[in-house]
Amino acid sequence: MRPLRRADPSSIAGHRLLGRLGAGGMGVVYLARTPGGTLAALKLIRAEHAADPGFRERFRRETRTAGRITGRWVVRVLGADPEAREPWLATEFVPGPSLAEAVALHGALPEPTVRALGARLADALADVHAAGLVHRDVKPGNVLLALDGPRLIDFGIARSAGATALTATDAMIGTPGFLAPEQARAGGPDEVGPAADVFALGCVLAYALTGERPFGTGAVAAVVYRTVHEEPDLGEVPDTLLPLVTACLAKDPAARPTAVEVRAALGEAGGPAGDWLPPGLPALIARSSSRVLGLPVPEPTVLAAPEPPTGVSRRRALAAGSAVAVAGAGGLTAWLLGRGPAGKGAGAGEGAALPAYTIGVLTDLSGPTEEAGRAQERGARLAVETFNARPDRAFDVVLRVADDGGDGKRATTAARTLLEDPGLVGVLGPTTVPSVVAAVAELVDRSVPLVSVLAAVPNGTTVEGQTTQRTYFEPRPSPDTMIVPFVRYLSERGIVRTALVEDRDGGRSTWFAIKSLKQTPPSQSRGGTVTAHPVEADGEDFAPAVRAALATDPQAVMYVGVSPRRAALCAKALRAQGFRGPCGSVEQPFTREFLDLAGPAAEGWYFGAGRVDPDGLPAAKDFAAAYRKRWGLPGTAPVDPYATEAYDVVNWTLRALGTAVGNHSESVASGVANGLRQTPYKGLAKTYSSDGRESVVANLVGLFLWKVKDGKPYFLGDFADAAVAEAKRAGKT
């Protein structure tokens, strides 16, 4: 929990606010005391979203839905006002960790604990279904652990069985890995019923018993595919519970037990407080409870005129001074709601100073990924300079750059530095997963969006505050899909025998790629086959694996791993043993290091990647010329990798910023996050969407095929079109 901010109210409808439990683009969740003294989690919706009739109706539905659930194992509604200017909903507060946090801290839970957990969750679902509702998002993160038992939370997407959803008809509702096959297929309202919750409960039980998701992790598309078409991995589930979990995970909804039947199979849903948890968890819950109960009541907040920070621009100081003057006259709210678009309102005559907003670049400028980090800074700076040169702009943009060295701890400091700027409305750039996780944890309470076109956060990694309203965006394809471009090329060429050099130094990435390639080899419809030939992680000699691979008489060879250096060793071994057929790999090893170490052995290799060369895109020719001019590069020099994507993302953010300013958003940063969530952007490289890696359809958007030609990377274009064209040039095998 975090302390209240100066701008937070002291109370809402008689509920005394104690601190912040979380924040997102749509609003804030506070820890509060009700007028009767009970602790509550109070969700407050921002006014700009409440003004949307569709959003307000969804909130009304959530309030009505939550109010209909009265069972012991669900959080109770303590109060709500969906018609207020800023609607709110208060539910009882559970101080314990989520099941996801408990498993992350303690590992798999013992069978008696899981039996009690499952019986009580089944009891909760029985109440939900008896009320004519379907939860639709039963997952470990929505199960809170209290001393007397679990609590099922978050009925935001629950609805009546058979009711028409307010979301798009083709939307996949729920959390991949914990949703039923009928949900994964975006089934209609008549198809997704109570049995979907039972399927999700089976996934939760398997997760609690083993610490692993029954349908694995990885790209959303792969998880969803396995959920629909493959059997779950239940090898570690105890034999005593295996039949029940297996029945819950039946593909056919009609073959699953009901929630009542699951409860009966697991045993008593009651029981004394505290006896169901393994050692360690009761103490954790007790400590959390004591900290909350001992919180002092904050003093009432007072609106005061903020001092402009040292070093703020004269334009921003003038704008802040105007706001302070109006606030002193008691008219701050009226000014916020009634002003015209920035720079165009009353008093903004010709030559008047424009308001200024800040976009941050938090990236690696001194660590292992500094080349990509520097490119992102350059692309972002060009986008901002181009925007500020427009005579019709409604505001100015300031670019602030912070170096994290690719390190999570440094990213925390860098994010805090950026947050010192009160005009910060968005941040671009982390190149590593630790930097993303650390930066989001600092930015989320201010609802400042963070966008990364390079870092790829693995499924199952916790990114703070993303369960309700997202502020982190990753508009790039998953690394797990990078095998697709080369596989597509081999299929277009009619290759039926492919050998895989399996570099086990790649860990989970290699394992998942090998599994996917065995399930869906190149030219599968023509009887395509693959063979895998491992190189152990502690080995440096690729010659034996290559020799074994070539003994299968392959038509193509693929290096499956993530190391540029080891990929180069593989390429050299293939060349030394005389293989001249198509070779390829994925984005991670496709670096200058690979090209330098492999030398002539790299010639002709293909790579799947999520970045572009603007010289290969007609729409990006002007950008490429402007980039070279701005940074003093020769006309033949390639544009730095990821500079184009950074340029696009800043322009996407600027469009969202323009909308937020024009709509007089109470929180401009929150308005920017909303714009990124709601409206895709067609950039130079591709179309960017908040769906990103979370959309099954969008998962292959932004995949490109590259080739090493004359010792240099050569961009072939969108993978599907490029595969066809390159296969025609090569001729059918």
Image (spheres, rainbow, N blue to C red):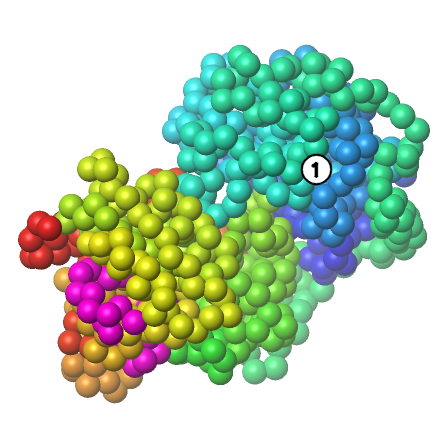
Camera sees residue 467: yes
Q: Is residue 488 above or below residue 34?
A: below
The residue depicted at 76 percent of the width and 22 percent of the height is 266
Graded by Cα atoms within 10 Å as few (under 14), some (14 to 19) or many (20 or more), the crowding at tag 1 reads: many
Q: How many marks?
A: 1
Residue 541 shown left or right of residue 245 in the figure: left
The residue depicted at 69 percent of the width and 28 percent of the height is 239
Please tell me in which quadrant of the rendered image residue 525 appears: top left
Q: Is residue 361 magenta?
A: no
Tell me the magenta residue range.
573-597
Residue 469 shown left or right of residue 183 in the figure: right
> Callout 1: helix, strand or loop?
helix
The quarter of the image holding the N terminus is bottom right
Q: Is residue 576 magenta?
A: yes
The residue depicted at 36 percent of the width and 66 percent of the height is 544
Percent coordinates x, y for residue 534 in the rendering: 42, 59
The residue depicted at 21 percent of the width and 81 percent of the height is 637
Foreground residue among 541 and 385: 541
Please tell me in which quadrant of the rendered image residue 42 appears: top right
Residue 578 shown left or right of residue 145 in the figure: left
User: Mark 1: which amino acid?
Assistant: Leu
Give the labeled residue for mark 1: 209
Q: Is residue 267 above or below residue 426?
A: above
Q: Is residue 558 above or below residue 521?
A: below
Percent coordinates x, y for residue 356 in the rendering: 46, 69
Percent coordinates x, y for residue 43 in the rendering: 68, 40
